[in-house]
Amino acid sequence: EPEVTQTPSHQVTQMGQEVILRCVPISNHLYFYWYRQILGQKVEFLVSFYNNEISEKSEIFDDQFSVERPDGSNFTLKIRSTKLEDSAMYFCASGGTGGLVGQPQHFGDGTRLSIL
Amino acid sequence: GESVGLHLPTLSVQEGDNSIINCAYSNSASDYFIWYKQESGKGPQFIIDIRSNMDKRQGQRVTVLLNKTVKHLSLQIAATQPGDSAVYFCAEDSSYKLIFGSGTRLLVRP
């Protein structure tokens, strides 16, 4: 069964440094997402991406964050200057094959980001 | 140790019993809902979904019920097994994003 893959599984970075989290969505999906989950809390939406542009973003997704689909398979989340409070699990998700609305999003296993 | 976060409600059931996990959603305009299972160290795993034009949908050992009048979802797991132990989240699809509930931890006693 196709799945969303994320790398690295764990990223440790000094505060103020840039970090790039990588995702390979399911190949025939058209919609791509990033979510984050602070330890012990619920999953929070960051950004959605369709047709090479951001569809929607949350208040968390400020100008320190950016997303990119550099080629036909990868989807990346960049944090320009990391803060301690960026420490969390970051999940990539993909969904939607362009047909019926209401198709589930499928999640990767996440990247644990630890800011020191 | 773990950092302080939201205290998850916990449901403890005997192996073989049925489990019912409840969820309230916020947006009466939401028209698509999903239940996810999250095991430790893993991402949310799709279990079952339901559209707002339905009030019940069944899968393998799982049933989702939707009550739009009171904005309530439930997930029923039949004959609960040790492998069902996880945190369960409901999510409402709200225009290009999912809004997750706070989750319920299911513990299955042998």
Image (cartoon, coloured by chain):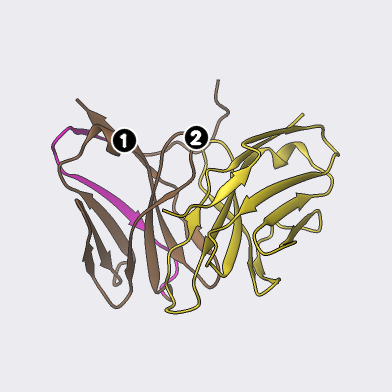
Chain colours: A yellow, B brown
Q: Pinpoint the chain carrying mark 2.
A: B
Number of disc labels:
2
At which x and y percent is residue A86?
A: 71, 42
Query: In the structure shown, which secondary structural element does the residue marked by tag 1 occupy?
Result: loop
At which x and y percent is residue B8?
A: 41, 38
| Mark carried by residue A64 | none
At x 52% / y 43%, what residue is drawn?
A: A109
Q: Where is mark 1, residue-wise?
A: B85
Query: In the structure shown, which secondary structural element does the residue marked by tag 2 occupy?
Result: loop
For this view, does B103 lie left or right of residue A89?
left
Q: Earlier in the sequence, mark 1 or mark 2?
A: 2
At which x and y percent is residue A45?
A: 58, 57
For this view, does A29 lie left or right of residue A116?
left
Please identify the quarter of the rendering in which residue B86 is found: top left
At which x and y percent is residue A44?
A: 57, 53
At x 50% / y 46%, what residue is drawn?
A: A42
Please identify the quarter of the rendering in which residue A48 is found: bottom right
Q: Which amino acid does the dot numbered 1 rest on?
A: Ser
At x 84% / y 45%, what residue is drawn?
A: A81
| Mark carried by residue B41 | 2
Is residue A84 among the parts visible in the rendering? yes
- Up the image or down, A43 lies above or below A83; here it is below
What crowding class fits label 2: few (fewer than 14 Cα within 10 Å), some (14-19), or many (20 or more)? few
Q: Which amino acid does the dot numbered 2 rest on?
A: Gly
Q: For the magenta stretch, what is the residue range?
A: B10-28
- Up the image or down, B68 lies above or below B84; here it is below
Q: Residue furthest top?
A: B1
At x 55% / y 30%, what residue is drawn?
A: B4
- Up the image or down, B92 lies above or below A37; here it is below
**Residue B24 in magenta stretch:** yes
Q: Pinpoint the chain carrying mark 1.
A: B
